[in-house]
Image (tube, rainbow, N blue to C red):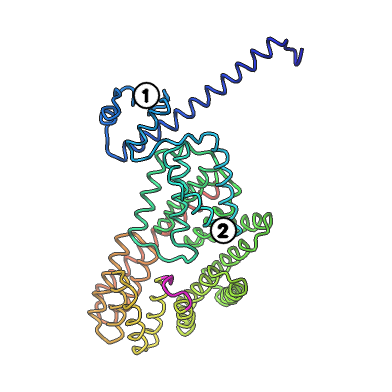
Amino acid sequence: MKNGMGDGEGFRYNTLMEKEHNQKEFYQKAMIFGRFVRFYRQQNGWSLENLGHTMHMSYSTIRRVELGETLLLPDEMDQIAQVFGFESFLDNWHLLDAYATQLDDIRHFHLVDIERMLDKLDAFLRNPQLKASYFFAGYALLELYAMVYAKKGLMKTIWTKEERQALRAKVDEIAAFKDLFSNRQRAVYEQLAGDTWYECLRFEQAWTCYERALCFDKTSYLTHLRMADTAMILNCDQVARNHLARCQQLVFATASSEQFLQLALLEAIFLARNNEREAAQAALLNLYEEGVRTQNTFIQRQALDNLAQTAFFAKDDMNAIVFAKRSIEQFGEHVDFALYFYLLFSYLRLDDSHHVRQWSEWILRRETAPLVRYFVEGALAWSEGELEKADEALGIVYSEMALHQEPGWECFFLERLIDLNAQLGRVDRVETYHRRLLALERRKQKTRSIVGLREKD
């Protein structure tokens, strides 16, 4: 006897355990395959009856499949996958644990070697057969990962309207089966959803997603880093400090040089946004030099961009021009459009119409984005004294920013329009734009209050 069981009892116990295990596996497979069927059926715009007719199955059978109440035979699963445009349904159940390890590897290299992370992510996505397998939900999650991080590579630029729409559509698509994810995958999904809202400049929604991500993984350096950044944008200084402190704890645990640089960059930006300009400039210059030494182009570019921004808002036009030009010349097509704004408006404030025209012509030869063209044409008209033409062009840019609810850029262009209409002597318009600025500030204050209260809770 062992553990109080006779040989017969032990055999029956093991048999029951095996049966229970097999039954649990059956239900898990049925649930995942059912969700696969429902997702692609709905994506194709088919009803249950449509799919049943195509498969020569009854409505009730398809419904039971989608609910995970029954699992079809392998050849029937292949036939359904073929109806959706796949070669077959890949039975990779035994590899799911290995795929989970791969996701952990991708997250690890995201912290210590982002180029290697992108390579591993790309290698994973080169197997589209996984779209029709028990890993179909995980594959979709990695597709979202690629859209958020790999699409732009290491050189971050402003997302276009179409890219933002595609990101949000992908987030909504995955939401239909996120309950299939493990806690680790849920944490990644919520963080990526937060990054999507962040890219759309909807910072309160981003914050909500980051909070949910921490519910599934409280030790995520990336999530805490994004929360610190978002809190800074919302001017929630104490909240930002809390998350920066948590990031420091997590960095010391991993001792990643890449993370140290990212964190130092965020701390320098924090100084700049709190008007500690000299300390911020010194920190950013040190980061730029370290980026050059380590050949880290991301840090170089971010340091230069923030140096230009810090100088511009401090009305240090010469330094804004120097840093903006250096970033544009060094990083070419990957440049952040905001640098064009800082560059041209700095020249405008210096009353240097020659360089406004020179750079306007240079930008217009390279950029086709309508908003950038309207902005450049407005700045050029302003420099040449064609104030009404400038007002019309910059008004279009402002209207687009307001339409897409981008408060940061709304404020930026409202301030420019106030200056411009003051020169035109249009008192009514100046007052209208001032009221809009106040309304935007109240909206931002409300968001800051909400975030601050959540953090206390």
Residue 401, relative to residue 391: is it above or below? Answer: above
Q: Is residue 334 magenta?
A: yes
Image coords of residue 425 (percent x, y): 25, 81
Q: Which residues are magenta?
A: 330-336
Q: Quick one: 274 or 203, which is closer to the camera? A: 203
Residue 171, relative to residue 176: is it above or below? Answer: below
Q: Is residue 450 in sight in this rendering?
A: no
Image coords of residue 309 (percent x, y): 47, 74
Mark number, residue 155: none
At label 2, which amino acid type do we have? Arg
Q: Quadrant of residue 381?
A: bottom left
Mark closer to the observer (2, 1) = 2
Image coords of residue 49 (percent x, y): 26, 28
Q: Residue at 30% of width from left, 68% of height from top?
A: 398
Q: Is residue 36 left or right of residue 221?
A: left
Dot 1: element:
helix
Q: Is residue 239 magenta?
A: no
Q: Quick one: 445 or 358, which is closer to the camera? A: 358
Q: Quick one: 80 or 195, which is closer to the camera? A: 80
Residue that numbered label 1 is attached to: 64
Estimate how packed mark 1 is, as few (under 14), some (14 to 19) or many (20 or more) residues with alpha carbons within 10 Å.
some
Q: Are marks 2 and 1 in contact (CB under 8 Å)?
A: no
Q: Is residue 438 left or right of residue 303?
A: left
Residue 437, relative to residue 376: is it above or below? Answer: above
Q: Residue at 33% of width from left, 73% of height from top?
A: 367
Residue that numbered label 2 is attached to: 116
Q: Which quadrant does the N terminus fall into?
A: top right
Q: Quadrant of residue 429?
A: bottom left
Dot 2: element:
helix
